[in-house]
Image (cartoon, rainbow, N blue to C red):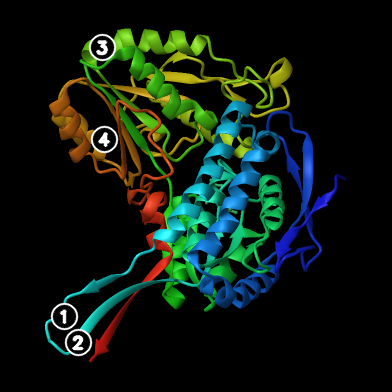
Amino acid sequence: MAEIKRMFINGEWVEAEGGERIEVMNPSTGEQVGAVSFGDGRDAVKAIAAANEAFAGWSRLTARERSKYLYNLYELVRKHRDELAGIISAEMGKPLREAKGEVLGAADNFMWYAEEAKRVYGETIPSSVPNKRIMVMKQPVGVVAAITPWNFPVNMVARKIAPALAAGCTVVLKPAESTPLSAVRLFELIEQAGFPKGVVNLVIGNPESIGQEFTASKKVRKITFTGSTRVGKLLMEGAAQTVKKVSLELGGHAPFIIFEDADLDAAVQGLFESKFRTSGQMCICTNRLYVHESVLDTFTDKLVERMRRTKVGDGREKDTEIGPLVNEQGLNKVLDHIQDAREKGAHIAYGGQRLTEGEYAKGFYCEPTVLTNVTKEMKIYSEETFGPVVPIIPFTEEEVVVQQANDSDYGLAAYVYTQNNSRCFRMAEALEYGIVGVNDGAPTQTQAPFGGYKESGIGREGGYYALEEFLETKFVSFGL
Ligand code: ADP
């Protein structure tokens, strides 16, 4: 068995109380790439106590002092970009080029919040009576419990812990159990950056048991989570016990709408970015492609032509554009959506199969796939696929396609391609989504708000919006 990586609690690397361990597998090859200590609620209790102990000291530092630690971390993450990217690729299959981009995105978060930490401003408000003064101050909420998924195993951690630490909160992080190695490496850099003990803690292990401690603990004042809507609802319910703040980044089912006046080459490129990055395993991935009937054939031909040139393979190979799915369960769900659509009358314009020959034999690979004749009755029309499948639905009327696009329980990201300025604004305003890419298939940036409407979540990550999520607002009334 490989070296056992441990958890980081109160500034020390520790084994799980229960002594359990798990192996980490590479979805490109089925090989073991590492092993970690696997804890449970007992370890979470220790980590929460450490974070609680550290809170007074950390929150009382000046913002400039906190900022220095975040800058240190920014520099360390940049310096170790290739190494971190290699770990990401090995444990979840993402192409190296994308993994390097992810690490730079994480570094950017540490830098952004190192700067933004210094700009947590309060306010004074004119009083209605002459002998009083109104002051509004911002204070850190307290101990934060963060839970992250496997699809961006480094950047999701950064997006949560950077604003939390900048605000003056202390943190306990639980990463996804399939991608703990990159979190461990990031925490080694956190240790190197010199954060005081207990300020940032890492607990790896049983999600239900750890989640239970996070939600029930009175010491935890905020839960920040990215993952499925199902688990998000459980956490929100649990957090109600102690009326904690919650930020939830949940599932999505993004519509991508191509009008007759769109630049079709730009639309193919935008679709590629929104659909195939991370093998289609992002919550902002396109899940319904609406194409105006008059450009349907031309667009489909262009898309299929682009897909023929796409290299699917081991994430660690240089020329790989699309890697494997994260595990067998993920692959089976994608194949089930394709099969279901086929049975209900969809036509396969490209792909449609699991790849099993040669280099693909041991991994969880699905051909990038284009489906036409897709209808509302098919699972893929309303359920999140989380895989490299493009279902195409033709339309003719703008008003109708807006209704169709909004007819979803999700509301995270939507995309529109058109060269008509008025329509750009009409669509941006009409779509019930937290993020709208207008002629842009990759709209995320560190400083912009990221989050969803409806069952896609509550709260926002990114920019000042994320900092707000970790702050309380206090009103102080001064009698003169
Ligand atoms: P996915 O289907 O994408 O893996 P999940 O919502 O299951 O999404 O997982 C996202 C994160 O939530 C992971 O870190 C996982 O361990 C964690 N998780 C799963 N179930 C629970 C739970 N009951 N309580 C707390 N965290 C959970």
Q: Amino acid at mark 4?
A: Ala
Return the residue at label 4: 405
Tell which circle, 1 or 4, labels the residue nearer the N-terminal end. Answer: 1
Q: Give neighbour class at mark 3: few <14, some 14-19, many 20+ (Cα, 10 Å).
A: some
Q: Position of residue 277 (x, y in %)?
A: 50, 29
Left or right of residue 111: residue 132: left
Marks 1 and 3 in Cβ contact (< 8 Å): no
**Mark 4 or 3, nearer chain start:** 3
Distance from Cα at disc 1 to Cα at disc 2:
6 Å
SS of the residue under disc 1: loop
Instruction: Point out the tag, 3 or 2, that comes first from the N-terminus.
Output: 2
Labelled pair 1, 2 in contact (Cβ < 8 Å): yes
Task: Check disc 3 and give the amino acid type.
Answer: Val
Q: Which mark sits nearer the N-terminus, 1 or 3?
A: 1
Relative to residue 50, is residue 372 depicted above or below? above
**Residue at label 1?**
127
Figure quadrant of residue 459: bottom left
* Residue 343 appears in view: no
Q: Quadrant of the N terminus?
A: top right
Element type where label 2 sits in the image: strand
Q: Are marks 2 and 4 in contact (CB under 8 Å)?
A: no
Q: Amino acid at mark 1?
A: Ser
Residue at label 2?
A: 132
User: What is the C-alpha distance between the residues marked 1 and 3?
Assistant: 61 Å
Query: Badge 1, how many Cα within 10 Å: few under 14, some, many 20+?
Result: few
Q: Are marks 3 and 2 in contact (CB under 8 Å)?
A: no
Give the number of the mark in front: 1 or 3: 1
Disc 4 is placed on an element classified as helix
Q: Crowding near pointer 4: few (<14 within 10 Å), some, many (20+)?
A: many
The residue closer to the viewer here, 55 or 368, is 55
Which residue is denoted by mark 3 in the rendering? 295
